[in-house]
Amino acid sequence: MSRIAERFAALRVRHEGALVVFLTAGDPNPELSEQLVLTVAEAGADVIEIGIPFSDPLADGPTIQASTFRALQQGMTPIRVLEMVARVRQQSDIPLVVMTYFNPVWQMGVERFAREASEAGVDGVIMTDMPPEEAGEWHPVARRYGLDTIFLVAPTSTEERRKLVAQKSSGFVYCVSRTGVTGARQHLPEEVPRMLQAMRQVTNLPLCVGFGISRPEHVRAVCQMADGAVVGSAVVSLVEHEATCGDTEALLRSVRVFVHSLKEATRDVGP
């Protein structure tokens, strides 16, 4: 059983939803980014998505686009991200998923990326712009190196696409709450329950909802319907705001408190 599957199984026993937190690797700088990953793990996150900075992040809104720009300015590359993952892995057994686009993987080489990601301690990979129909080169390599591949579904996904995502995914399925790009929102879209119900009919994999989840009440509402909630832009925005103050300890403390409040919202909500 993979590290991701083990975590979801343990959460199910405790009637808890999963808190999945996204961070951009290298933001606001490489050293602090590594501390942030460990802080988020200690604060209660169940899975951490580590975004590999990319110059053309089509699925991301202004908040994460700005964070990837800051990280790229700091010289972050896919190899440096995997080196950071390896150091984190020496200190934490939390499931780690890297979120990227296909181009950086292709540039590094599919086989090399999968091998080095696995050796670093990555458990799963999300390639935002890779639909399951186009995963023929990646999928067998990922399986060979023990990497889960997490595909995305959206409210606009057809029944045929939902079935294909269910068939090709492992670890969990990333359910995009709405069309458009990432970014914090005030309210949850009404389409979420219908999308989850449709996915439940085709898979037993955990379902995690992301895009627009920014508050503890959002997390609680999502975890009453799904197996987990993904929070990205709200955390990245907090990091950006606190980083401008120049007080590292205060930044880490703010992130720890916020992530802890999000995790508390996942308790006693499972079936």
Image (spheres, rainbow, N blue to C red):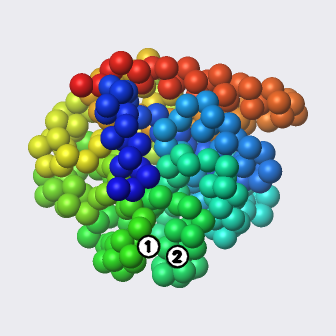
Residue 126 visible in the displayed image: no
Residue 85, compared with residue 42, is above or below; it is below
Check whether the beta carbons of the residues at disc 2 and disc 1 lie within 8 A of each other: yes
Residue in front for this viewpoint, 146 or 164: 146
Amino acid type of the residue tagged 1 in the rendering: Tyr
> What amino acid type should be assigned to the residue bearing mark 2?
Arg
Residue under label 1, please give it: 145
Q: Quadrant of residue 76?
A: bottom right
- Disc 2 versus disc 1: distance between alpha carbons? 6 Å
* Residue under the image location 58 percent in, 79 percent down: 108
Q: Is residue 89 left or right of residue 190?
A: right
Q: Where is residue 8 in the image (x, y as percent from the top left)?
A: 36, 41
Tell me which residue sits at (55%, 31%) in the image. 44
- Quadrant for the N terminus, please: bottom left
What SS does tag 2 mark?
A: helix
Marking on residue 115: 2
Q: Which mark is residue 153?
A: none
On the image, the x and y values in percent for residue 240 come to 72, 36
Image point 36% across, 80% down: which residue?
137
10 Å crowding of disc 2: few (<14), some (14-19), many (20+): some
